[in-house]
Image (cartoon, rainbow, N blue to C red):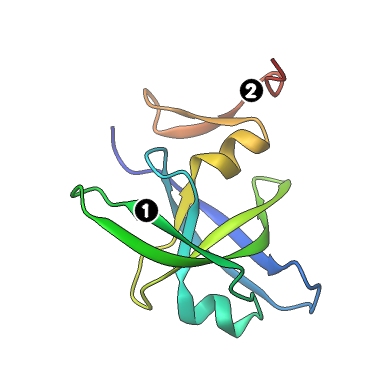
Amino acid sequence: MGLTYVTVRLKSAAGNGLSYEHAFLVDTGATDSMVPGNELAKIGIAKAGEMSYELADGTIQKYPFGIATIEFMGELTAGRVIFGPDNAEPLLGVTALESVGIAVDPAHKTLKRLPAIPLK
């Protein structure tokens, strides 16, 4: 499958009016979303904790995370956003996708809306 990008806007849950908007790589192998940490700090997202994540190469790395509102494709959700390295490519994880009922269509390399969000 090729790469799929979507424009995402992040805002602080504190409601300070600041936001970060960028094309995010859709990464169905990632649970949480990741953004350069310096960008999250600029919009006032506070570090709320730290988690260990397994990277694509199999190594384990601890990263701090914060809570943000996440907007894309006309949908709004909230969740954990990892404070990644300052040069990190922004990633949209599967938790944000699934929480608004959007899935990846691998045949067309696009995102599609599910008819309903599973609640079972």
- Image: 111 above or below 34: above
Q: Which mark is residue 53?
A: 1
Could you give the CA–CA distance between mark 1 and mark 2, rounded to whole angstroms? 28 Å
The amino acid sitting under disc 2 is Leu
Residue type indicated by callout 1: Tyr
Query: Label 2 belongs to which residue?
Result: 114
Looking at the image, which residue is at 65% across and 45% down? 73
Instruction: Report the residue that reaches farthest toward the left.
Output: 57
Q: Secondary structure at mark 1?
A: strand
The image shows residue 61 at horizontal and vertical percentages of: 31, 61
Asked where in the image residue 68 lies, by quadrant, the reply is bottom right
- Marks 1,2: beta carbons within 8 A: no
Tell me which residue sits at (18%, 50%) in the image.
57
As drawn, 111 above or below 25: above
Structural crowding at the residue carrying mark 1, measured as other residues with C-alpha within 10 Å and reported as few (<14), some (14–19) or many (≥20): some
Task: Judge from the rendering whether residue 20 lies leftward or rightward of residue 58; answer left or right.
Answer: right
Disc 1 versus disc 2: nearer the observer:
1
Query: Measured along the vertical axis of the image, is residue 7 above or below residue 104?
Result: below
Mark 2: which secondary structure?
A: loop
Which numbered disc, 1 or 2, marks the residue that appears first in the sequence?
Answer: 1
